[in-house]
Amino acid sequence: MTAPTLNGTRYPQPIEDLLPAARGLDLPEGQRFPSRNRLMREFRIGAPKAGELLALLKAEPTAPPVDSTAPDAPDPADVPTVPEPVPPVEPDPTPVPEITPPERDAEATPVGRPDTPTPPLTPVPVRSAVVWPVVLLALPAFVAIWSGWVGLGGLTGFGVVHPLPGIWDSFSINSAITLPIGVETYGAYALYVWLSGRVPDRARRFAKWSAIASLLVGALGQVAYHLLEAAGVTAAPWWITTAVACLPVAVLGMGAALAHLVRTHD
């Protein structure tokens, strides 16, 4: 839609140039001024500009006098502007071309320096250390520790007992074996709990110090036995007997405490 041709141009004209053309419009009988909708339609102008042009027309001194006998006609400027119906837009029969998304470039492979080793694509499995040498080392240590504790137990009053009198009189056991089984087994277990790192902090601290104490007691027991055996003593002094007699009770208490702390999640 273009503006009407005035003065040889199609560009929007100023109001001063449109005023003569608006004054020369043919009006129906009895109508003094063109309506704002007609000014908008005739000159292809907007509502503000049409209203201003209509105001200039009404302000001209050459306007004919108003007939007081004629019935009051509504002011065209006060009539609300009715938008012109817009013709329906027919769909374009031309199919819309399908837009193909651009292909993504392949990921660039980083290129390292020639002297830089390329890391392996798959993790290399880590082989665990073999444990059979520990078994080989433990066999002679077990023999020496076992014989030392059993010998020290014999010097401190441990010996053959019948634990089931009246039930199984023939059953007997040397109570000296409780020393190596209790002290050394607890020391190995506490050392494992300490170094595993899979227990609460309280259990780990208790296992650490009790393992160290158990290993020190085991070493002192071996030293005491060999010193007494080398000196030809047949009965240990009372203080050694007292300490050795308390070992099974101490091992039982430390084992129960460590088992409780291992299962505690506080």
Image: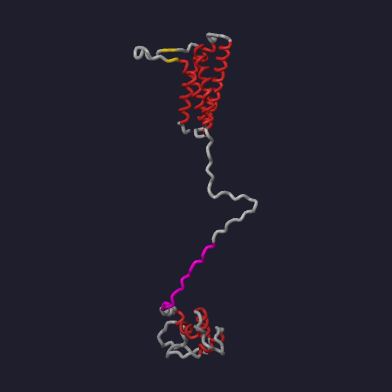
> Residue sitting at 53 percent across and 29 percent down?
134
Coloured how? secondary structure
Q: Residue furthest left?
A: 167
- Number of numbered discs overlaid on the protein picture: 0
Question: Residue at coordinates 51% horizontally, 65% vertically from top-left?
Answer: 103
Give how far across and how far down residue 80 sits, in percent: 43, 78
The image quadrant that residue 71 belongs to is bottom left
Dominant SS of magenta comes to loop
Residue 20 picture location, percent across and down: 53, 89
Q: Position of residue 185 (x, y in %)?
A: 49, 24
Q: Nearer the viewer, residue 58 or 234?
A: 234
Say if the magenta span includes residue 94. yes
Above or below for 146 versus 124: above
- 264 or 110, nearer to the observer: 110
The structure residue drawn at horizontal position 47% and vertical position 86%, both measured from the top left corner, is 34
Residue 152 pos. (x, y %): 52, 14
The residue range painted magenta reads 89-105
Residue 20 shown in magenta: no
Residue at 54% from the left image edge and 10% from the top image edge: 236
Which of the two residues, 248 or 60, is positioned nearer the viewer here?
A: 248
